[in-house]
Every structure is written in C-alpha cells, then in structure tokens.
C-alpha cells in the first residue's frame, strides 16, 4: 500500500490553500505520496462548480469564493475541522464514490465514539444527526487524483449557515459536536484539534496506508 503524508497546517486563508492543492495535484506523478491536509479557515463561503447564487442570502462582508469542487454552497470558519484528501485513486483502483463512502464511514465512526448516532442520506453527501448536517463533503478529481475534502462542525459560530441554503438545500439545519455534548465530556466534542486527531485515526485506518509521516508545512511546489 502507498505511503501517506499528513500536513497539520493550522489556520490557513482559504484561497492560497486551495491553489496549493491545485498545484500539488497538477505536479504530482505516479510515485508521489498521497497527502492529507488538516486546516482551519477564517470565515469564508465557498461555492462549488454547480453552485447557484440564489442559495446565498444575507452574508454581510464574509467573502464568497467560487471553487472547482463538486457541490453547492457551504461555510468554513474557526472551530471547524477541515481535512483535504489528495489521493491517487488510480493507484488504488478506486472510484470517487468508494472514497466518499470511506470518508463518511470515518466520520460516522468518530461520532459513534463520541456517543453521537449519525447517518448518511441517499443522494446528499455528508453526515447527519437527527436530520441536521454535521459534516459536509466536496471533492474534485483531476488526472485520477482527488483534492478538496470534508468539513466537520465542532465548536464554531453556526450563525453564518443561516445566511445560505447549506449545500443547496433551503431550510437545512446544521449542528456541531459541541451542541451535542450534554451527556458526556469527551474532549473531541468541544476541542477541534482533538476532533481532528481522532478523525485522522479513523480515516487512516480505513484508507490502509503502510507508512505515515507528519509535517507542519505545505509541500514545496514549483511556481
């Protein structure tokens, strides 16, 4: 099985991180290690390739970035775990649906460990708790390799979601682990960094990498 590089990047502006993912995917070869990038973004709305602006309402001065992932409109902000998966699907002989299923399974397993019962919805990628969305997925495949990824709401201001139709669904409610924490005191429910570490453990087990290295910087990319 291939090796994996995990990059724990902390707070990152959205657009430079997105462009770095594009460059990494464009420059990678058949022997390039897969990577997972863990970040937290300042407040930003991102609109996918099929996104329609009628799903954006009163957003104030929060920027909107039209990006090349699948899906509609979503929000990123402090207190949310964002994990980007830069994976060579051809090397694994996987389709994108298989990878999406693995990601959703990892999130559901994490939430089960937090004593939260979560599910998927047919035709609506992501993870839900009692019908409320707690994690969003949006991917892009280029040259057989993925970029973009998932966001998990942990301990953030959810108010900006009320200014959009989340993922293009008017009236869709969102939730987060910290709002579901009344029955236990597990650290990951309220601490994004702990939730990130816990989710990585589930992801890397399901993705079955032989060796894993961890970095705190972006890869060196040619301009």
Image: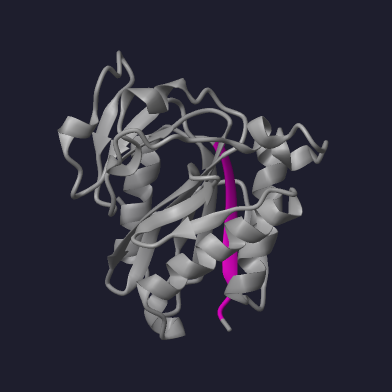
Q: Residue visible at 33% across and 23% down?
A: 163
Q: Where residue 192 sits in the image (x, y, percent)?
A: 65, 37
Question: In the rendered view, would you say 151 is above or below 107?
Answer: above
Q: Where residue 223 sits in the image (x, y, percent)?
A: 29, 50
Front residue (pair 166, 85): 166
Q: Residue 182 lies in what quarter of the image?
A: top right
Q: Is residue 100 visible?
A: yes
Q: Please, which residue is most extreme toward the right here?
A: 185
Question: In the rendered view, would you say 146 is above or below 166?
Answer: below
Question: In the rendered view, would you say 120 is above or below 144?
Answer: above
Q: Residue visible at 51% across and 49% down?
A: 128
**In this picture, residue 1 sits left or right of residue 85:** right
The residue range painted magenta reads: 2-10
**In this picture, residue 194 sits left or right of residue 68:** right
Front residue (pair 76, 32): 76
Question: Main SS type for the magenta part?
Answer: strand
């Amino acid at each position: 099985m291939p090796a994996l590089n995990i990059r724990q990047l902390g707070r990152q502006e959205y657009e430079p991180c997105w462009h770095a993912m594009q460059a990494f995917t464009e420059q990678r070869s058949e022997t390039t290690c897969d990577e997972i990038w863990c970040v937290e973004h300042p407040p930003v709305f991102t609109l996918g390739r099929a996104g329609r602006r009628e799903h954006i309402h009163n957003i104030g001065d929060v920027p909107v970035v039209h990006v090349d992932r699948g899906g509609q409109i979503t929000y990123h902000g402090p207190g949310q775990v964002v994990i980007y998966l830069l994976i060579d699907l051809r090397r694994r002989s996987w389709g994108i649906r298989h990878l999406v299923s693995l990601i959703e399974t990892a999130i559901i397993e994490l939430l089960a460990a937090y004593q939260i019962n979560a599910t998927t919805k047919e035709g609506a990628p992501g993870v839900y708790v009692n019908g409320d969305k707690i994690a969003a997925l949006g991917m892009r495949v280029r040259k057989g390799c993925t970029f973009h990824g998932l966001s998990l709401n942990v301990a953030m201001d959810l108010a900006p979601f009320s200014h959009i139709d989340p993922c293009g669904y008017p009236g869709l409610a969102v939730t987060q682990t910290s709002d579901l924490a009344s029955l236990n005191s597990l650290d990951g429910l309220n601490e994004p960094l702990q939730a990130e570490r816990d989710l990585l453990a589930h992801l890397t087990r399901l993705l079955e990498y032989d060796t894993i290295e961890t970095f705190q910087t972006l890869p060196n990319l040619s301009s």
